[in-house]
Amino acid sequence: MAMATKCRHRRETKSLTTNPILLLSLLLVLLHLPTQTNAAESKCAASGSQFSCPNCDGITVSDCMDCDGYLFTDYNYELCYDRKLFNTNAENGDSDNHYPFLWYDIAGTIVWFLTAGIATACGVGGGGIYVPMGILLLRFPPKPSSGLSQASIFGASLGGLLVNLRKCHPDMHIRDTKGSPSDVQPGKIVSYEKDKGPAEIESDRQRYLEGGDGSRKFYTRPVIDYNMALFLAPMEMAGAVLGVIIQRLFPNWLFLSFAAVILGFTAYKTFKKFIAAYAKDKDARETKMRLSIAETERANQKLEMNEVKEIDATATNGDATATNGDATANNGDATANNGDGGEVELTEMGTKEEEDNLAKADNNEEEDDPKDLEKRRQFLEDDARQYPKEKLAFLIILWAGLTVITFLKGGKGVDSVIGLTCEDAGFYVLVAAQFLWTLGFAAVFGWKNVKATQERLDVNYPFHEADVLWDLKKLQFYSFFTFVAGIVAGLIGIGGGMVLGPLMLVMGINPRVSTATTATMILLTSSSVAVMFVMSGLVPWEYALYFFCICLCGAYIGKTKIDSYVKRTGMASVLIGVLATIIGLATIGCIVILLMNLAKVDWCLDGFKAFCTVKAEEDKCPATRFLFGAEEELFPY
């Protein structure tokens, strides 16, 4: 490795008050936050230890994050060293070949594989697990652990997308009929399967296909709600941008404490939702089983009655051939037999009554306006497309725009690719561009969702009980809370999954749809950030690539198995329970890291930080050009 000729001197800090544009912006948003701090005068100084770094012809640094390519610290030997995947031949004290981490990497492989499958099935990235385990299990520093987490999330979300793209909505039998309007949820219909056993459901479906104008069929949709993703994803991202700005002012102990409180509360609320959903799923299974047993008993009873009727009829016909005189007696016996067969008549009457009710329902459907029916079928055909090209294209455009802005502006601990710093006006132009891009996207697709919902309501579209009927009131409500959720996510360094997942459950969205949709949204943000981390050298590329592949395979296999279990058992509440567990574990990890960080500085609580901190351009080692940026996010996405 070529050594640089100049070594880096101390960083220069710039007070927030020297930038009037930033000061004015933050005063409008954060009136109660201090606007003048000086990071260099922090009262909580780090350890005074110096570590040997082979860069710049051999130097000593107080933090191995300042040693390009040798980011890992050995406190016993007081040196910075490079980490090699599955390293077995190691010489203590050699920065290029130090410490065998074989068993750590094997254990990490197992944990990452399992976490990817479970987290992706629940619609979260898993950063709340990857980052703490990267620090505690793999012995990565916080910033490289965050980078490794981003690469892992990218792989897991891509694996989940490969599964979700082929999956259909849980309701595979959407009809083109108006259905029975719901009294509880106006605009939606009562499920055709409600209070029916399997045989009755199948019989009802067959009658539906045989009725109407002969063009009836069942419809479905993709499990990913693209309309929702195109609206909620940019709103959450806009909030996250503001949250990250606020986070730059907060000391680590404060936002980690805030993260523990928010995640703990979210885990509590999600667990309560799991208990309610589990009870509902259990009741639905018991009802389905009870209806199935009742159907079987009715079928057996009907079969027995028919057998008795056939036997009586055979006996009556045999006696009738004897004599004319006996025929009169046989007629009397037949009358008696008919009296004994009252249950048969009642059964037939009950069946006839059910058929009359179904026929009456079919007649009501036949009263449907042909023009409404034709338009409704067009909407159903449009919604049934498994790969809506224009929506996928818009998601790609959203991703591309965010990626370009992120690379130009920098962030997530990585410098701008064009050399911008918080001292430059261009930096704030790009911050504004982030808001304009995300909020503009959200506004356009929010309006599109409202318009599409109204058009479908006008023709009695069969909205599912778990569908969201977008109107201006709901648009304002959900956009506000999604934006606030994004602020919280950006502030505490998690991401959309752990915030939007529970929010969607509160909205009443089907758990399988919400998890697939949030997993798709996570892919949009994690991919570009993961590439930035690897390109900057903040995470060893072999670790990033390896755990990317492990998580991709784990997510693909794990999600496939978990989805199969949920489909087979109907217990979608399991996803909510696992989500609550993941958020709970992330809370514990957050608390552990908080305590570890405080212990390193003798439990000293630092004050607010300077928003703008840049390095001096003169006399610095070029190899360390990317090592100064925003604070690392300990629980990204």
Image (cartoon, rainbow, N blue to C red):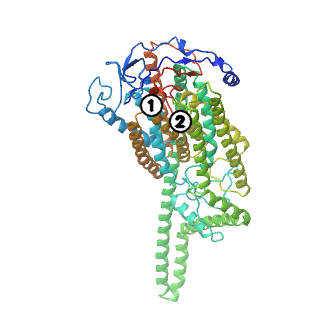
In this rendering, which labeled residue sits more in front, label 2 or label 1?
A: 1
**What residue did someone put label 1 on?**
538
In the image, 7: left or right of 211? left
Alpha-carbon span between mark 2 and mark 1: 25 Å
Label 1 near label 2: C-beta < 8 Å? no
Please say if 419 is above or below 393.
above
**What residue did someone put label 2 on?**
498
In depth, the one of 64 and 570 nearer the eye is 64
Could you say where residue 627 lies in the image, as x and y percent from the top left?
48, 26
Give the residue type at disc 2.
Answer: Met
- Which is nearer the N-term, disc 2 or disc 1? 2
Q: Which residue is at a point 40% across and 40% down the rendered structure image?
A: 545
Can you name the residue that lies furthest to the front here?
A: 5
Describe the element under mark 1 as helix, strand or loop. loop
Residue 444 sits in quarter: top right
In the image, 192: left or right of 128? right
Tell me if residue 177 can be seen: no
